[in-house]
Image: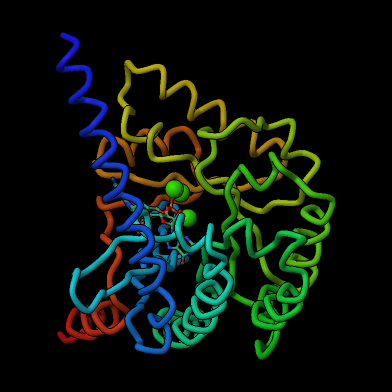
């Protein structure tokens, strides 16, 4: 038993070393990724309760020259630690705005595009870059009829947790400039609905871990229903993410959920493919 114990420690050491090397290498490769045009965005539709496409969420992908396609969960964390998320985040907003233009011209002016913004991009340590972030989010765009500029910022609950003083002001400023705010992954963090009352958010996104367990019997149903009715009483609209089945969609609609997003409707796709599909679908 002693031997095995020692081996385990050794294996753990080796694994740790590889993980560290891998991280160092990825962070190094991230440096040139923007210039080498290795990133692209995919877009996933968000539908209303009668199935009409109202919004798209922009999600980043990294086509690595030797490792192939790397999903965001495998590099965003490193990019946050190294600070590279600031450059990447600005690139995402620029791309998303170009896509917004195209999507609005195809689907209509009401279409919105949401982008994930890392808490690092809003932290005090990045205050010199926050100005640029604002310019990117708010500039250029002619205001829509509803005073919305078409962009939605998605932020996670942890932003509220280590809420530096600036957070609330940022959220207010976004909205003043016609940028709506969505609270992402709701229910996975530590914050509660009472927290939300003190912030100005437009949407709450129910995390897919609740949605995936949804069926008539499961307590997830009551939870989702409760989150939806409480959000509504605060004047906040609700998006459910990770909707994979017809049953989940039907239940969420029954509970009054305003928007649905998930593989049941569509996987995230490249902009060209979304527009091409739409064109071919509309040919009689
Ligand atoms: P998220 O913001 O919660 O995004 C939703 C994730 O769920 C996406 O994974 C999406 O592809 C996936 N998804 C959508 N529908 C379904 C479904 O029906 N079932 C299941 N199982 N999954 C579904 P993705 O694209 O791999 O992104 C993972 C996370 O990476 C995102 O989670 C977000 O936190 C982060 N991320 C993605 N793009 C960006 C970005 O541009 N900037 C930053 N800071 N983070 C990003
Ligand atoms: Ca998101
Ligand atoms: Ca989410
Ligand atoms: Ca997430």
Vertical comparison of 63 with 238: above or below: below
Q: Position of residue 121 (x, y in %)?
A: 64, 65
User: Would you identify the image quadrant in which residue 75 lies?
Assistant: bottom left
Residue drawn at the location 46% of the way across and 55% of the way down? 77
Q: Position of residue 198 (x, y in %)?
A: 81, 41
Q: Nearer the viewer, residue 267 or 111?
A: 267
User: Would you identify the image quadrant in which residue 208 lies?
Assistant: top left
Vertical comparison of 63 with 193: above or below: below
Q: Residue furthest top?
A: 1
Total of numbered circles in the picture?
Answer: 0
**Relative to 137, is 61 on the left or the right?**
left
Q: Nearer the viewer, residue 28 or 30?
A: 28
**Relative to 134, is 91 on the left or the right?**
left
**From this viewpoint, is residue 143 visible?**
yes
Q: Position of residue 131 (x, y in %)?
A: 76, 78
Residue drawn at the location 39% of the way across and 72% of the way down? 28
User: Would you identify the image quadrant in which residue 36 lies?
Assistant: bottom left
């Amino acid at each position: 038993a002693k031997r095995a114990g020692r081996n385990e420690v050794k294996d753990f050491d080796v694994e740790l070393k590889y993980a560290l090397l891998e991280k160092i290498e990825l962070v190094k490769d991230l440096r040139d990724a923007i210039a080498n045009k290795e990133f692209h965005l995919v877009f996933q539709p968000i539908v209303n309760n009668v199935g009409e496409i109202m919004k798209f969420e922009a999600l980043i992908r990294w086509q690595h020259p030797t490792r192939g396609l790397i999903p965001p969960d495998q590099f965003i964390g490193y990019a946050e630690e190294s600070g590279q998320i600031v450059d990447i985040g600005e690139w995402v907003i620029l791309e998303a705005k170009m896509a917004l233009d195209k999507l609005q011209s195809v689907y209509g002016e009401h279409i919105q595009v949401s982008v994930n913004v890392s808490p690092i991009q809003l932290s005090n340590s990045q205050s010199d870059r926050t100005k640029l972030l604002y310019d990117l989010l708010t500039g250029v765009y002619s205001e829509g009829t509803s005073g919305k500029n078409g962009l939605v910022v998605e932020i996670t609950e942890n932003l509220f947790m280590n809420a530096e003083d600036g957070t609330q002001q940022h959220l207010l400023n976004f909205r003043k400039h016609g940028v709506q705010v969505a609270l992402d992954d709701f229910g996975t963090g530590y914050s509660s609905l009472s927290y939300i009352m003190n912030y100005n958010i437009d949407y709450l996104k129910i995390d897919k871990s609740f949605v995936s367990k949804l069926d008539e019997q499961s307590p997830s149903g009551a939870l989702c229903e409760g989150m939806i009715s409480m959000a509504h009483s605060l004047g906040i609209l609700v998006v459910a993410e990770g909707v994979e089945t017809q049953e989940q969609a039907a239940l969420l609609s029954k509970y009054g959920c305003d928007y649905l997003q998930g593989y049941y409707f569509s996987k995230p796709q490249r902009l060209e493919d979304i527009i091409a599909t739409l064109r071919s679908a509309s040919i009689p």
